[in-house]
Image (cartoon, rainbow, N blue to C red):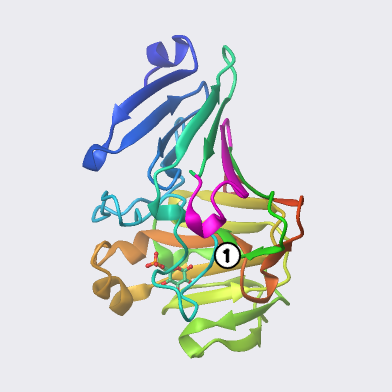
Amino acid sequence: MNDTQLNSSFPRITFLEGRGDMPMLEITTRWSTAEICLHGAHVTHFKPHGEPPLLFLSQCSRFEPYAPIRGGIPIIFPWFGKPAGQSSQHGFARIRDWTLKEIQSPADGPVTVRLALPPCEELSNAEIIVEYLVLVDVALNAELIVRNNSMRDFSFENCLHTYFSVGDIHTVSVAGLKGVEYLDQPAGFARRTETDDVIRFAAEVDRAYLNTTHAVDIHDPSLNRTIRVEKAGSNSTVVWNPWMAKAKALSDFGDDEYLRMVCVESGNVAENRLTLAPGQSASLKIKLSSAALR
Ligand code: BG6
């Protein structure tokens, strides 16, 4: 984007038929651009001006009605992984078409988009209300709100499964999880404690860190930046990179794309699952920002 474009009026919001003819919003603020697909209420792109994109999106992603998008921020709800008895992995929120409820776009300010998951049988029709707010600013903020309007407890897992774009996974380190217990999926969900100051990547990493509310920093020397993942209403952080063999096995992911991404996911999974009593609600928030490495 050049200076002339930056000096024109902001924000700019465009509705498009995106890939796979899926309705999407393109948002440009004074500070950043973002794209949100109504399929899955999926933020597929966020880029502060003058920087490479913060979010990774696979070149091989499907944009199809019953498939999740590979990259960006899939919304994982109401279950994480593939519990016994469930037919799909990571819940159904990421493969449903959400309803656009509201856009707030004050002149020269940030843009807030509010989306809602349409009522469905699995959520007792309109008794469990699920909304998603995306605030496009210098940073990207997102909030998933679940309200239990039923007469019974409602129990669920949630996760904002964020794919970050990195220059070279071999030089990336993830800080903020030292001393935290995690379930190590490649080792059959063995329970371990993180002893390293930072996590580095030289093989598949698929870990659900539990009982942690801390922010996480992704240091990326090849893009000369640190991405900060701040969160609220989240007791779990999942760190995932599929590495070589799993990348090849994923049909919607390029063989070499594991080199340029890492997932740091904020939510409440496994023993951190949430239970809402009638009338209660839960909010899961993330704030994604970046700064040059010092
Ligand atoms: C991560 C899980 O959150 O998501 C991994 O911990 C999983 O086990 C990954 O492979 C991707 O899942 P999916 O369903 O999008 O391929």
Residue 123 image offset from top left, x and y in percent: 55, 56
How many residues crowd mark 1 within 10 Å: few (<14), some (14–19), many (20+)?
many
What residue sits right under mark 1 in the picture?
A: 174
Q: Which residues are magenta?
A: 119-139
Q: Determine whether the residue tagged by mark 1 lies in a helix, strand or loop.
A: strand
Vertical placement of residue 38 versus 184, above or below: above
Vertical placement of residue 37 versus 286, above or below: above
Q: Find residue 276 and report its image quarter.
A: bottom right
Inspect the magenta stretch and tell me whether residue 132 lies in it: yes
* Ligand 1 sits in quadrant: bottom left
Q: Is residue 283 left or right of residue 206?
A: right
Q: Find residue 142 and report its image quarter.
A: top right
Q: Residue at x 54, y 50 (%)?
A: 125
Q: Residue at x 24, y 40 (%)?
A: 19
Q: Is residue 12 left or right of residue 147?
A: left
Which residue reaches farthest front?
Answer: 151
Vertical placement of residue 232 versus 113, above or below: below
Q: Find residue 135 and report its image quarter.
A: top right
Kindly tell me whether residue 290 is visible in this rendering: no
Q: Amino acid at mark 1?
A: Val
Q: Is residue 46 left or right of residue 195?
A: left
Q: Foreground residue, 283 or 228?
A: 283
Inspect the magenta stretch and tell me whether residue 40 lies in it: no
Kindly tell me whether residue 129 is visible in this rendering: yes
Residue 179 image offset from top left, x and y in percent: 73, 77
Residue 117 image offset from top left, x and y in percent: 50, 45
Residue 88 image offset from top left, x and y in percent: 39, 69
Vertical placement of residue 67 versus 99, above or below: below
Q: Is residue 208 left or right of residue 222?
A: right
Check mark 1 vs ligand 1: CB closer than 8 Å? yes or no: no
